[in-house]
Amino acid sequence: MTSTQSKACCTVPPVVAEGYKEKGEYLTIEGMKTYATQVSPRSPTSPTPPSIPVSTNSGPKTAKSAILNVYDIFGFFPQTLQGADILAHADGEHQYQVFMPDFFDGKPADISWYPPDNEEKGKKLGEFFNTLAAPPKTLERIPKVLKAIQAERPDIKEWAIVGFCWGGKIVNLVSQEGTLFKAAAACHPAMVDAKDAPGITIPYAMFPSKDESKEDVEAWEKGLKVKNVVKWWPYVFLSVPRNQVHGFMAARADLKDEKVKADYTKAYEELLSFFHDNM
């Protein structure tokens, strides 16, 4: 079934096209460098990221909800970090602590490999997906990450998860029976598989781009048994077709293009509305 979203009371700040400076800080969680939107004070000269802080001095200090953000294969990119900050701060009625672990341990894919339009790029991407990006390792780490955060942040009462590209596949796999999350979202997801859908047990949003297979997404959608939102990007706005590429909410977002920036903003507003309604 498809739900109708209400509009969250959110105001996405003007999106920064170039030179974005993230508002959070990098912590060490379960041995991984982790971007966190709610942080504690430390010396700017500190050589290593701190462990999870209990007290905070920025971000949504009263947030009882948290979002685990599973980046795309390109890791920590300004566009992805800006999106995490938007999720943390833009909904005035419901703010979030957002955590983005470096599941690739400092070795993300090179953005020049995409699109894989020659044999060499295809080989490199294939090897990456079969090694560092193989889902089992990440799936094993996620409960440990949440447990570590929860031990130091007992104020967090509920979790959601959002994933981009490869992260969307991870989200599909952790939203099954026994999930630790209350709501889930996959943005321009990779490896959409209809076999994942029947086992999903929590409200779910999917935002496919023009580059995702319509056949795969529709087959996946038919298998869902939970409240869901599937919103395509392409769509028609004021009678004008808008077509966004795979990655437009994360590392491949060309925010210098006004149309891309507008859709990036709109997509994060829609994502916030979904979480607002389901957490």
Image (cartoon, grey):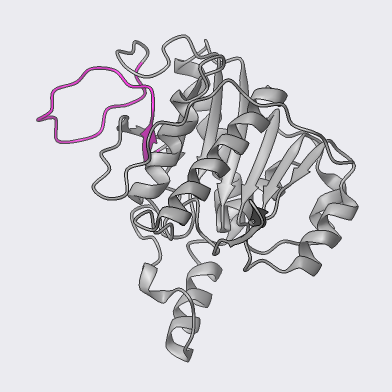
* Left or right: residue 148 compared with residue 172: left
Residue 51: image quadrant is top left
Residue 129's x, y, as percent?
A: 54, 68
Q: Nearer the viewer, residue 184 or 148?
A: 184
Residue 74's x, y, as percent?
A: 41, 59
Identify the residue shown where x is 66% and y is 26%.
7
| Magenta segment main secondary structure | loop
* Left or right: residue 111 compared with residue 136: left
Identify the residue shown where x is 13% and y is 23%.
43
- Measured along the vertical axis of the image, is residue 146 above or below residue 248? above
Q: Nearer the viewer, residue 169 or 272?
A: 272
Residue 112: image quadrant is bottom left
- Measured along the vertical axis of the image, is residue 40 above or below residue 222? above
Residue 259's x, y, as percent?
A: 47, 55
| Quadrant holding the N terminus | top right
Q: Nearer the viewer, residue 4 or 36?
A: 4
Residue 228 in sight from this viewpoint: yes
Residue 180's x, y, as percent?
A: 68, 30
Identify the residue shown where x is 52% and y is 22%.
91
Give the magenta range: 31-53
Residue 208 in sight from this viewpoint: no
Identify the residue shown where x is 79% and y is 54%.
196
| Quadrant holding the C terminus | top right
**Does the magenta-highlighted stretch encompass residue 195?**
no
